[in-house]
Amino acid sequence: MFGYAGRVLRVDLTTGKTRVEKLDEETARKYIGGIGLGMKLWLANSKAGVDAFDPENPLVLALGPVSGTMFPTGGNGHAFISKSPATNGVGEAVSHGTFGAELKRAGYDAVVLTGKAERPVYLWIDDDSVQLLDAASIWGKSPSETEDAIKDEVGDYYVRVASIGLAGEKLSKIASIINEKTRAAGRTGLGAVMGSKNLKAIAVRGTHDIVVAKPDEFMDMVKEFHERMKGPAAQKYRTLGTAENVMIQNALYCMPTRNYNNAHFENAEKVSGEALNERYIAKIIACNSCAMRCEHEAVVREGPYKGTMARMEYDNLWALGPNCGIDKLDAIIKAAELCNYYGLDATSTGVTVSFVMDCHETGILSHEDLGGIDAHFGNAEALIQLIEKIGKREGIGDVLADGVKVAAEKIGKDSDKLAQNIKGLEVTGYDLRCLKTAALGFAVSFRGADHNRSGAYALDLTGKVDRLKAEKGRGKLVKDSENIYALIDSLIVCKNAKGTLYNELADMAKLYALVTGYEMTPEELSAAGERINTLARLINLREGLSRKDDTLPWKVMNQPIPDDGPVKGAVVTQDELDLLLDDYYQSRGWTLDGVPTKSQLNKLGLEDLSSIVEGKEA
């Protein structure tokens, strides 16, 4: 096989035994790699209804066929897949950097981890040598400290490490898996799954070459995409980074502020990408094989948080800033650093803090409940204090460490109306009340509230559709976008470089053929994207999710945007959501209950999974 390593590593953490299996060629072609391959391997190795923290819940680490090659952004990604403790459905998180490339060079397309180690361990993969080593000395350390300690222990600075922090060890359902100290496989709580297995880290060193099918033509494509990444399609990422979105979203009145109490932040310029880059960005770093550079490293040089350093993106800046009503960039950077230190998903953490602030301001939580923390919107010190509590699971932090859905269940008093989540996963920084294509994309996203499963928000923001209107046709738009995003995360290439795929499916089909030697038409590749999304739906159905879970937060459907501006009064009604869901399910060939039909499964080559929909098609 070209591109693919052709091998899957299996590790039983209970017994300590490892074995290598051949990656089936048909499976590779049907599911491409990355999240597609990872979900297929998880489903094949798990039992229906398994608890996320059960030792028998597999944790899968998967790479794409382009991983380890020189293709810009395609050489560096990796994906973790498991059952999410936050949603009880598909848990999936992609990260970039250099870790994925190193694992491919070690000779693996995927690692399937099962069982639970008797005591803390880390997995050390050195080409064909695979060992479970004692992690007692690094248990309790941050991912950054863990990475340094492992590199010292194995005596190689160039070893790549993905690890969990204290949050993962304490089974926080918003815990992430961190690589390269600041890069996170952040969403769906997979750091807690890793912690439940007593697995502190995965360290890897690889020395094998990655061989592509058509090296000369591949290099021509690499050169072409290097040039594309120097052009306008990637300019935002090379300059201000995704933090540029702050002022864009704010101007359109679609940036959730103070936990959806507003859609516009009056102090946005203080936390803008422009302000961040002018005052705090010290360096812009690229991942392995990337010609673009987009990792904006911020450093606080003075004041109470002097010496703080964190990678800043729109997502963590929004969640820890405007979403909490906070306009102090130094405190936001400190909050982001703390999320990395404890191994917390910064987006979920920021949304959880804003939920607490909302509960406090509405009288649901008192000062006493919060251990004396003055959790009002705009209080930067409260933000820092609450993250410390969440990371350590101390006091109120023990209630909050599992995210807003669980916290609301514990707190009661109608606090669920303030808990901004879908399927148990906290929302991201797009006000769904005035972005109705995005609202549908978020509602049906197989991993819960998220913009990165379809990118449907872009259709609303760019004016390609009327963002305030729910109408037929949006279902197909979301479906097509989901298929593209599934392919991006299965190949794996970076979504920040999506704009350089001028002819999306055609470009990806060409790349896949040059790397693997498997010719695939754009239409066949699109079918693979549909197959991957349908597979995710089947997993969620098997685990008990249904149409009722394809919904939106209470505020999105009951609290119209109050701000004077172009979207005042916008809200998503139940009738609008039902129209959008019906349209989406029909576009996918599913029943109106959101169940894939057997004929659709046959069409996609998923007939072997038809037992999952047995009795649910009616």
Image (cartoon, rainbow, N blue to C red):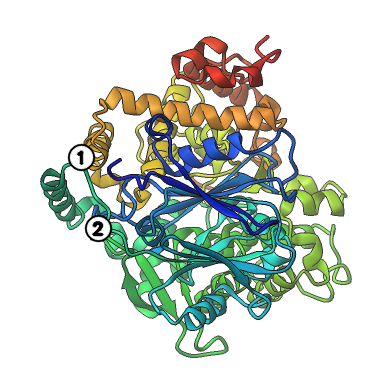
Q: Amino acid at mark 1?
A: Leu
Q: Is residue 505 left or right of residue 578?
A: left
| Quadrant of the rendered image containing residue 44 | top right
For marks 1 and 2 on the same chain, the one whose residue lies earlier in the sequence: 2
Q: Is residue 76 visible?
A: yes
| Quadrant of the rendered image containing residue 450 | top right
Q: Amino acid at mark 2?
A: Gln
What x and y, as percent, mark residue 185?
Answer: 52, 57
Residue plotted at (78% across, 51% down): 406
Residue plotted at (70% across, 27% down): 548
Residue that badge 1 annotates: 514
What x and y, as percent, mark residue 524?
Answer: 32, 24
What x and y, as percent, mark residue 477?
Answer: 41, 27
Residue plotted at (32% across, 72% down): 284
Marks 1, 2: nearer the viewer? 1
Q: Is residue 579 left or right of residue 243?
A: right
Q: Is residue 571 visible?
A: no
Residue that badge 2 annotates: 235
Within-10-Å neighbours for mark 1: few <14, some 14–19, many 20+: many
Disc on res. 503: none
Instruction: Decide which of 121, 239 is in the foreground and name it.
Output: 121
Within-10-Å neighbours for mark 2: few <14, some 14–19, many 20+: some
